[in-house]
Each structure stands twice: as structure tokens, then as C-alpha cells.
Image: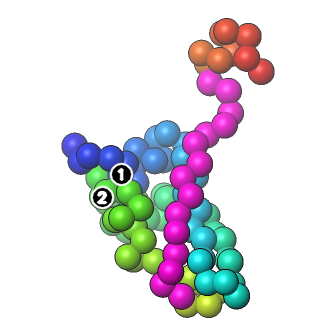
């Protein structure tokens, strides 16, 4: 198994990955469709920022200066509910 995240491991962990444009006149943000990326590149394809960023460009301005934000699933899990979490 590859070191770091793959598209499938991000999906399994219910992570959201959002691309954001660093162009000062743009600042566009867009969530990535991880299922579509998995289907296109394969489930075991590395999905770390260094792997994905070179393949991206802003859908709004076409700029290549793009960053990623990885957001974990914030819904309570079974352990949290068992311990009294909401």
C-alpha cells in the first residue's frame, strides 16, 4: 500500500478535499469529486497534495497556483456516541 492517502482511503475516511485558487483576483474554491477522481485514476492512486496539485488548474481563472484543504468528517462516530457525544 502507498504511503499517505489514496483516493479510496480519502473516500473511506469521508474526507472532503477542497481546491482553492491562490490568485489574488480570484480566490475560487471548489470541492473535488473524489469518487470521479478514483474512477478516473484508480483507487490506489496517491492523493497527497504533492500528487494532486500539479494536475489542477482553477476552473474560474485557469491559474495553476492552486492549494488543497483536507477536511475530516465531522459527524460523530459510534465511539463518540457511546461516550455520550452528540
Asked if residue 29 lies left or right of residue 86, the reply is left
| Residue drawn 61% across the image and 84% down it | 23
Counting residues from the start of the chain, the first of labels 1 and 2 encountered is 1
Secondary structure beneath dot 2 equals loop
Work out whether 6 lies above or below 85: below
Where is the N terminus found, in terms of image quarters? top left
- Determine whether label 1 and label 2 are within 8 Å by CB: yes
Q: Residue furthest front?
A: 24
Residues rendered magenta in the picture: 63-77
Find residue 6 and name its label: 1
Label 2 belongs to which residue? 45
Quadrant of the rendering where the C terminus is positioned: top right
Is 73 within the magenta? yes
Query: Mostly what secondary structure, the magenta segment?
Result: loop
Would residue 77 appear left or right of 84 to someone viewing this image? left
Q: Secondary structure at mark 1?
A: loop
Residue 42 screen position, x and y as percent: 32, 60
Q: What x and y, as percent, mark residue 83?
A: 67, 9
What colour scheme governs how the chains and residues are painted in the rendered image of this protein? rainbow
Residue at image coords 29%, 52% = 44
**Crowd around label 1: few <14 · some 14–19 · many ≥20 (10 Å):** many
- Residue shown at 62%/90% (left/top)? 61
Residue 74 placement: quadrant: top right
The residues tagged by marks 1 and 2 sit, at their Cα atoms, a distance apart of 5 Å
Amino acid at each position: 500500500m502507498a504511503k499517505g492517502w489514496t483516493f479510496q482511503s480519502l473516500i473511506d475516511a469521508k474526507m472532503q478535499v477542497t481546491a482553492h485558487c491562490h490568485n489574488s483576483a480570484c480566490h475560487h474554491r471548489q470541492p473535488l469529486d473524489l469518487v470521479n477522481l478514483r474512477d478516473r485514476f484508480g483507487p490506489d492512486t496517491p492523493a497527497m497534495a504533492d500528487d494532486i496539485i500539479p494536475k489542477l488548474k482553477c476552473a474560474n481563472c485557469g491559474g495553476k497556483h492552486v492549494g488543497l484543504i483536507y477536511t475530516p468528517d465531522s459527524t460523530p462516530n459510534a465511539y463518540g456516541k457511546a461516550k455520550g457525544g452528540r
